[in-house]
Image (spheres, rainbow, N blue to C red):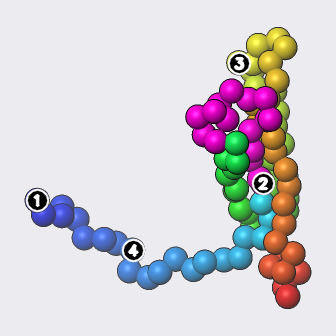
Amino acid sequence: MGIANAQNLTAAVPQLPRPYGILVQLRHDDPLRKILGAHWQKTHWFLGAAERDRVLADMARRHEYSRIGDRPALVLEKIEKLAESRGL
């Protein structure tokens, strides 16, 4: 089967440093750890600290569909690549 349209991305996308991050992990008592593993984690990287903090606040907020007594299932932690953020 042929390709319908040629790729329109002719130049490579530059890889900008993204020194500010959010480390996402499961709580120690989360039953999903049995499926994903005890050391599961996901990292999200951002260009600036303000953008990271805005996203972190949105990820950590109590959502409108949460039930009374629900606790967040994820542990969110701010992280930073010091060498990239300080230009070393």
Identify whether 46 is placed above or below 10. above
- The quarter of the picture where residue 16 lies is bottom right
Q: What element carries label 3?
A: loop
Q: Which of marks 4 and 1 is nearer the N terminus?
A: 1
Q: Point out the residue furthest to the bottom here.
A: 88
Q: Is mark 1 on a helix, strand or loop?
A: loop
Between residues 12 and 88, which one lies in front from this camera angle? 88
Residue 59 lies, in percent from the top left, at 76, 40
**Disc 2 and disc 3: Cα gap in Å?**
23 Å
**Disc 4 and disc 1: Cα gap in Å?**
21 Å
Q: Which of marks 4 and 2 is nearer the N terminus?
A: 4
Between residues 11 and 68, which one lies in front from this camera angle? 68
- The quarter of the picture where residue 17 lies is bottom right
Identify whether 44 is placed above or below 59. below
Q: Point out the residue furthest to the top here.
A: 68
Q: What element carries label 2?
A: strand
The circle drawn on residue 65 is 3
Q: Which of marks 1 and 3 is nearer the N terminus?
A: 1
Q: Do the residues labelled 2 and 3 touch (CB within 8 Å)?
A: no
Q: Are marks 4 and 2 in contact (CB under 8 Å)?
A: no
- The residues colored magenta run 22-37
Residue 36 lies, in percent from the top left, at 60, 40
Which of the two marks, 2 or 3, is nearer to us in this view? 2
Residue kind at label 3, given as amino acid type: Tyr
Residue kind at label 4, given as amino acid type: Leu
Residue kind at label 2, given as amino acid type: Ile
The circle drawn on residue 9 is 4
**Disc 4 and disc 2: Cα gap in Å?**
29 Å
Q: Does the magenta stretch include residue 42?
A: no
What residue would you read off at disc 1? 1
Residue lying at 73% horizontally and 63% vertically, measured from the top left: 46
